[in-house]
Amino acid sequence: MKVLDVGCGAGILAESLGRLGMGSVTGIDPVPKCIELAEAHLSLDAELSKSVNYRNVSIEHLISEMETSADPDAELYDLVCCSEVIEHVENQRGFLHKCIKMLKPGGLFFLSSIAKTPEGWFLNIVMGEYVLGLLPKGTHEWNYLISQETVQQHLEEVGCQTIDKKGATILNPITREMGEIPYLRANYLMMAKKGY
């Protein structure tokens, strides 16, 4: 399986996917410091370095490489992940469409984000940033939060159907343990499948 982690940050998800035996995992991030941190952490595990790699590029750069490749289909991925990224993106619709452009027909797209609800705002911004200090103040802004329904609509525009969705939240703020919840009003995870 060939996996792309868009906006990989310091590589937490990419390395986890590599440890699960996903085959080839590529993490991309346009922020040089994120890739530097990801590569430094990856260098501590020689075995994992065989299946995980990082690139300091944007999704647009990857699309450009794919479109100019002698075999564009060989540049596509079986699974594209976008975890906790979309809520920092200006043109969310365009960004989602670009992520799907890098996905093989029949491939899977995974996304996690903060719901654009009072609960999502309160739990993540008020509690997470200002009360508990789990994230730096100002990490998230209400205007950039996006509902699961809006993400689903944008994906449907490019032939991706949502096949599963779950709610998630911090169950224990001290240990930072997260878990699934039966509603999508705090944080959500979703999986979509690209048509053939």
Image (cartoon, rainbow, N blue to C red):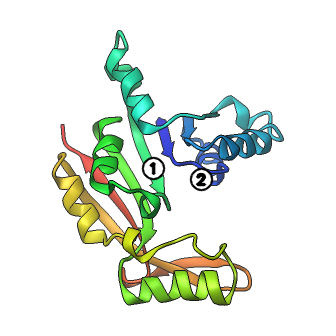
Closer-to-camera residue (21/111): 111
Q: Is residue 65 above or below residue 157?
A: above
Provide residue 167's location: percent of width, then percent of height: 41, 77
Per the image, the residue denoted by label 1 is: 81
Is disc 2 placed on a helix, strand or loop?
Answer: helix
Q: Which residue is at a point 56% across and 37% down the rendered structure image?
A: 25
Per the image, the residue denoted by label 2 is: 13
> Is there a contact, CB below 8 Å, between mark 1 and mark 2?
yes
Q: Is residue 171 visible?
A: no
Q: Label 1 crowding class (10 Å Cα cut-off): few <14, some 14-19, many 20+?
A: many
Q: Residue furthest right?
A: 44
Badge 1 amino acid: Cys
Is disc 1 placed on a helix, strand or loop?
Answer: strand
Closer-to-camera residue (126/109): 126
**Of callouts 1 and 2, which one flags the residue occurring earlier in the amino acid sequence?**
2
Looking at the figure, which quarter contains the C terminus? Answer: top left
Relative to residue 59, is residue 133 drawn left or right? right
For the residues labelled 1 and 2, the Cα–Cα distance comes to 9 Å
Q: Label 2 crowding class (10 Å Cα cut-off): few <14, some 14-19, many 20+?
A: some
Q: Which residue is at a point 38% across and 76% down the rendered structure image?
A: 115
Q: Is residue 17 visible?
A: yes
Closer-to-camera residue (184/138): 138
Q: Which residue is at a point 22% across and 56% down the rendered structure image?
A: 154
Relative to residue 49, is residue 4 drawn left or right? left
